[in-house]
Amino acid sequence: MDHFGRARALKLAVKEDYQERSYLGELGYQAKLESYSQFARFLDGGIVQTTVGGSPMEFVGCVEEWVEGETLEAFLVQCHADVSVSFLRTFVQVACEVLQSLFENALCHDDLHCRNIMITPLKGALETTYTVKIIDMGSLKPIGMSRKRFDDLRHIVNHIVAICNAIHERRIANTSERRFLRAVGGLLNSMLDADPDTSLRDPRQIREQFDLAFTRACQDSGDHPVVL
């Protein structure tokens, strides 16, 4: 809590982890995303001195806004009834905005697993509506510096697959939604295509192709598409 009773998230990292890189540089990457609503807002950071087991220790601390809600991992299990095609489309929209925001700043999140994605109810909405926000930017790196197995796009593909699987488990999708989900499979394959000339990687194009697939699915079935 801060001085006004507002919840804050504090992440501490061992200072020795930064012997080969500057913690100020990492905090600077987080500051670049401060104005992007898709990310938990960076508030402050620096060296934190505290006592652990009676011995003084130094950590690199990062303070972010506290994001209410559930992680994507927990949401798909605990809020199963709310996992719908509408939620999938919202997730794709925000995911593309996240990828675009990172691209604009020449950064990669580099740790975009399902526990670093928060699904939070939109306050003030007249019906249950969820939004998506990314937390824990402690692994931010310049594009091309990651050494991890999955890049940000691959993580997003994995999350879309998990959401689609959860929708299939509920077995309540109508004809147009089932047609849309089949089309999503082809789009995911394009996103994973290793050929840069044919792969679907541009965030704007990804969003456009998902919207187009939904519109076509509704038109083919005679349903009227819902505009989000």
Image (spheres, rainbow, N blue to C red):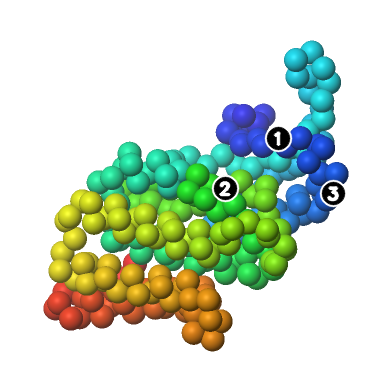
- Where in the figure is residue 228, as x and y percent of width and height? 34, 67
Could you say which disc has been placed on residue 135 in the image?
2
Q: In this view, does 154 lie to the left or right of 178?
A: right
Q: Quadrant of residue 172?
A: bottom left
Q: Distance from label 2 to label 3 (Cα)?
A: 24 Å
- Mark 1 nearby-residue class (10 Å; few <14, some 14–19, many ≥20): some
Tag 2: amino acid: Ile
Looking at the rendered structure, the secondary structure element under dot 2 is loop
Residue drawn at x 35%, y 75% as measured from the top left:
186
Q: Is residue 177 left or right of residue 120?
A: left
- Where in the figure is residue 6, as x and y percent of width and height? 58, 33
- Mark 2 nearby-residue class (10 Å; few <14, some 14–19, many ≥20): many
Q: Distance from label 1 to label 3 (Cα)?
A: 18 Å
Tag 1: amino acid: Leu
Q: Name the residue under label 1.
A: 12
Looking at the rendered structure, the secondary structure element under dot 3 is loop
Q: Quadrant of residue 159?
A: bottom left
Looking at the rendered structure, the secondary structure element under dot 1 is strand
Please identify the quadrant where the N terminus is shown: top right
- Mark 3 nearby-residue class (10 Å; few <14, some 14–19, many ≥20): few
Q: In this view, does 49 lie to the left or right of 43?
A: right
